[in-house]
Amino acid sequence: MSNAHKSPIQKSVTITPPAHPLSGAVSPPGSKSITNRALLLAGLARGTSRLTGALRSDDTRYMAEALRAMGVEVREPDPTTFVVTGTGRLLAPSAPLFLGNAGTATRFLTAAAALVDGTVVVDGDQHMRKRPIAPLVEALRALGVELSADTGCPPVTVTGTGRIPGRRVEIDAGLSSQYVSALLMAAAGAVPGDIESSEPLEIALAGDEIGARGYIDLTLSAMRAFGARVEQVSSSVWHVWPTGYTAADVRIEPDASAATYLWAMEKLTGGRIDLGVPTAEFSQPDARAHDVIAQFPHLPAVIDGSQMQDAVPTLAVLAAFNETPVRFTGIANLRVKECDRVRALSLGLTNIRAGLAAEEGDDLLVASDPGLAGQTLPAEIDTFADHRIAMSFALAGLKIGGIAILDPDCVGKTYPDYWDALASLGVDMTVRSA
């Protein structure tokens, strides 16, 4: 990838490869996935909920601000706690909800807006306006909810009636499991007595494909913590009763996606990093990447990333130093994340060394070259404003001199303290300000 288009004053972080193993203690931030689920459910609940160990980042800030705009009190007494007080109802906001590039907040609030008696506009930044939401819109429309999304992406205008009229829906979740999670959480949010039927809403997959199925388990667990009655009838059918939600105190577990960078740092440098939580205690899908990372430098020849999608950037950069090539499959959904991650990974790796990566359909092939370690190969990595591209390519900078990460502040989306964590482990970095 040519660097000719890069601004000479764009902010960057250039990493100096450490001459020592990275060892120490680093506590990953709270899980983004669980924090945003818990925030929404606490906002839908009647009473006061306390969420501890929570993530405070761009994505959770957008969710918290949106809830405030809909009449929910959200206090932040310390850096890892939200105290949420709701009435059991969300109110129509006075202005569109701006959610940046937060996919969870955008998908979840689009469905929850059906429970508002009034009009809600769900919008985001230029990147979010390219991320598909049509399958969720079509499912809500099939349930009788009035809404529109002219481009199939945000903005979405929802005219809610305070309830979800229909009792059964099929949804295509091939692009994202977040569509299913959004429907599940909204379905239980109806206040008892405000609906015509106490029968459950049946949510069924249209086809067998679903992105990162493990996140559905996170959703069900969070719903039950707030008093929902939900039953998984089969691998593709769920029944959700309109019980409303009850306030609860919830402890948020650390973010497994963030942990993957720390696990990879250990393997790349021969160090030992104490995350403060046993790997077995993670319930998030990306935790399964730990067993794959443990095999480095003998990673599998083929890695199916479909059920640990946010770990793929970590694994792809790690694969650059593997003994043998690695093909990543099941990652088509990465093309509709914060950026086209398949493309961004291919471009970034190729920018480090020609031929290091290639796209074959929706697969990513990493050629692998252990000899890269110890070389100086100046390369500017375009992060495409994607936090996971920035954090994963920082791993390359631990072994190769001259790796400069552009737009490093984009890590604020989910891990604002990432660069501080590297510094705490003894990694030297040079910051060029914009």
Image: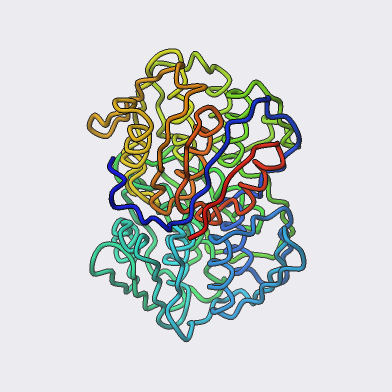
Query: What is the x, y in percent for residue 232?
Result: 50, 43
Asked if residue 28 lies left or right of residue 311, the reply is: right
Count the numbered circles shown. 0
Given residues 12 and 126, the one toward you in this image is 12
Residue 123 in view: yes
Picture residue at 42% right of the left edge, 30% below the top = 377
Given residues 13 and 82, the one toward you in this image is 13
Query: What is the x, y in percent for residue 120?
Result: 42, 78
Q: As displayed, is residue 2 above or below residue 251?
A: above
Q: As displayed, is residue 60 above or below residue 330?
A: below
Residue 196 in view: no
Picture residue at 34% right of the left edge, 58% below the top = 136
Picture residue at 49% right of the left edge, 38% below the top = 392
Q: As displayed, is residue 425 above or below residue 46?
A: above
Given residues 372 and 197, the one toward you in this image is 372
Residue ranking furthest to the bottom: 94
Image quadrant holding the N terminus, namely top left
Query: What is the x, y in percent for residue 40?
Result: 57, 64
Asked if residue 360 lies left or right of residue 155, the reply is: left
Q: As displayed, is residue 158 above or below residue 294?
A: below
Give the colour scheme shown.
rainbow
Asked if residue 192 lies left or right of residue 111, the reply is: right
Picture residue at 47% right of the left edge, 66% below the top = 109
